[in-house]
Structure formats: structure tokens, C-alpha cells
Image: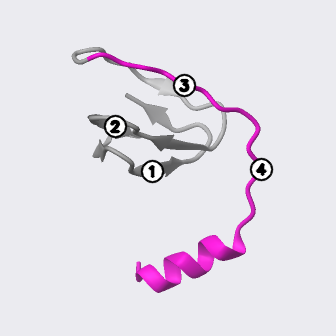
Amino acid sequence: MNVDHHIFLWNQASIKVLDIRYTRMKKDNSLRNYQLPASVFLFATKGSAEIQLDNIDYILKKFQVIHSGKGAHLS
């Protein structure tokens, strides 16, 4: 997707923050197959993480944000 088109779409969207959860994970900790109860934004404040959303691998680096929808499986 073109970045300008992506920004245009986000400028048209509205969000309402209902909940903020903070989890601090140490190296070698893992989370297995957690089903997301709502749409989420995952944000890394330090380090990096290898995550899997619906069996697709991603690397989340410091200050990156990833969005996923309700019902997705996070590992």
C-alpha cells in the first residue's frame, strides 16, 4: 500500500481507547496463542520482539506500532 494512501485512510478513521495494558517481558519469556479480545495496537518501548499474529511472523522493534484486529491469535 502506498504510504500517502495509508495516511489518508488513518486520517479518516476514528478510534476510542478503552483499555491500556502494560506487560514487561524478560528475554526468553513467551506468550503462547493468546486470542485478542478486541482490536489492539502493540507498541514496544524497549528492545525488540519476535511476534506472530495469525501465524504470520513479525519483528517489532523499539517504538514501532503494530495493529491487529479482534480475534487474532498472538504468540
Q: Secondary structure at mark 1?
A: strand
Q: Quadrant of the N terminus?
A: bottom left
Marks 4 and 2, how far apart at CA: 25 Å
Marks 3 and 2, how far apart at CA: 18 Å
Residue 22 tag number: 3
Is the Cβ of the residue at disc 4 closer than 8 Å to that at disc 2? no
In the image, what residue type sits under mark 3?
A: Tyr
Q: Which residue is mark 4?
A: 16
Is the Cβ of the residue at disc 3 closer than 8 Å to that at disc 1? no
Q: Which residue is mark 1?
A: 65
x%, y% of residue 27?
A: 23, 18
Q: Quadrant of the C terminus?
A: top left
Judge left or right: residue 2 versus residue 30.
Answer: right
Q: Which residue is mark 2?
A: 52
x%, y% of residue 36?
A: 57, 32
Choose the circle earlier in sequence order: 3 or 4. Answer: 4
Marks 3 and 1, how far apart at CA: 14 Å
Graded by Cα atoms within 10 Å as few (under 14), some (14 to 19) or many (20 or more), the crowding at tag 3 reads few
Residue 9 tag number: none
Is the Cβ of the residue at disc 1 closer than 8 Å to that at disc 4? no
In the image, what residue type sits under mark 2?
A: Gln
Colouring chosen for the image of the structure: one colour
* Magenta run includes residue 24: yes
Choose the circle earlier in sequence order: 3 or 2. Answer: 3
In the image, what residue type sits under mark 1?
A: Val
Q: Please, is residue 16 above or below residue 46 in the view?
A: below
Tell me the residue at 51%/76% (across/down).
6
- Magenta extent: 1-26
